[in-house]
Image (spheres, helix red, strand yellow):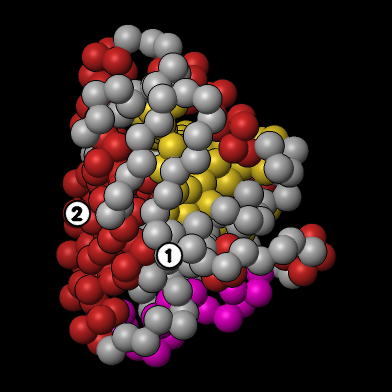
Amino acid sequence: MIDVERDRATGVAQLRIVRPQARNALSTEAAVRLLRAVEHTLADDAVRVLVLSGSGPDFCVGADRDEELGNEGLARRLRAFARLQRTVAAAPKATVAAIEGRCVAAGAELAAACDIRVGADDSVYRFPGSSMGVPIGAAKLIGLVGLGAAKDLLLTSRWVTAQDAYRLGLLQRLVPPGRACAEATACATEISANDPSTTALLKSQLQRFSGVLERIDAELLAAESFPGAGRESARGTDRESARGTDRESARGTDRETERGTDRETERGTDRETERGA
């Protein structure tokens, strides 16, 4: 469900959501597994930079709408998502998101928690909290795109093209389709070549000066007490987000069977297998 690959030569770790048949939608379990993978990777002194991506044609379409949850389960999933996103945002090591296809809801929040976002020029983005009854998104977006643009994206819940995302500052690098992971890895390798203690200090300063972690904490408190969060509309990604722009069927991408266990592939460098991530 979560692949982790460590390249000891470059110090770059790849963390990949492997749920292509679900468009990499995150269930509560998948979010917890990804959180553990992030925590384990951050604890590895040989890793200097993390790259987050999805398998198949999409980055992540948000919460798994097929997960059966009551109000308590919805609250538990919200907390799991919030902890995952805050852990990524607070990471002392640099993080880069490699985005192909749709990047929606909890997936967009995860990407926004990363330091740098690399997006394919046919990727699309949406922060649909206002249409789903979940007041999430302001904490990170306001620091990335500014107040006016954050209001536009959050209050309308509209789809945003990669070109608009790049213009607004949500994306830092725009690449041809299929090249997001390669460009994100190249970016991560550049960062990894720098002094790690200086990188960590700069990240700490940026977090403190921007106040992003305080905003994330305040947003979670507000979301947990908001009565609309338990409505039926909050049961994961809405139907429109799941359908997106119908590019997936046009691409004819083969759907893999979910492997259900974490695994790691060999790329010629010394890599360790993450068990139980």
Residue indicated by mark 2: 217
Vertical order, 15 against 277 (above or below): above
Query: Is residue 167 among what the camera can see?
Result: no
Residue contact at pointers 1 and 2, CB within 8 angstroms: no
Q: Position of residue 210 (x, y in %)?
A: 28, 35
Vertical order, 132 against 267 (above or below): below
Q: Identify the residue shown where x is 48% and y is 63%.
A: 259
Circle nearer the N terminus (1, 2): 2
Q: Quadrant of residue 101?
A: bottom right
Q: Answer left or right for 235 relative to 199.
A: right
The amino acid type of the residue labelled 1 equals Gly
Vertical order, 239 against 164 (above or below): below
- The secondary structure type at the circle numbered 1 is loop
Q: Nearer the viewer, residue 158 or 41?
A: 41
Q: Where is residue 131 in the image (x, y as percent from the top left)?
A: 48, 77
Residue indicated by mark 1: 260
Q: Identify the residue shown where x is 31% and y is 58%.
A: 33
Q: Which of 51 and 41 is in front in this view?
A: 41
The amino acid type of the residue labelled 2 equals Asp
Q: Identify the main secondary structure in magenta.
A: helix
Q: Which of 35 and 226 is in front in this view?
A: 35
Residue 238 falls inside the magenta stretch = yes
Query: Is residue 69 among what the camera can see?
Result: yes
The residue segment tinted magenta is 226-244
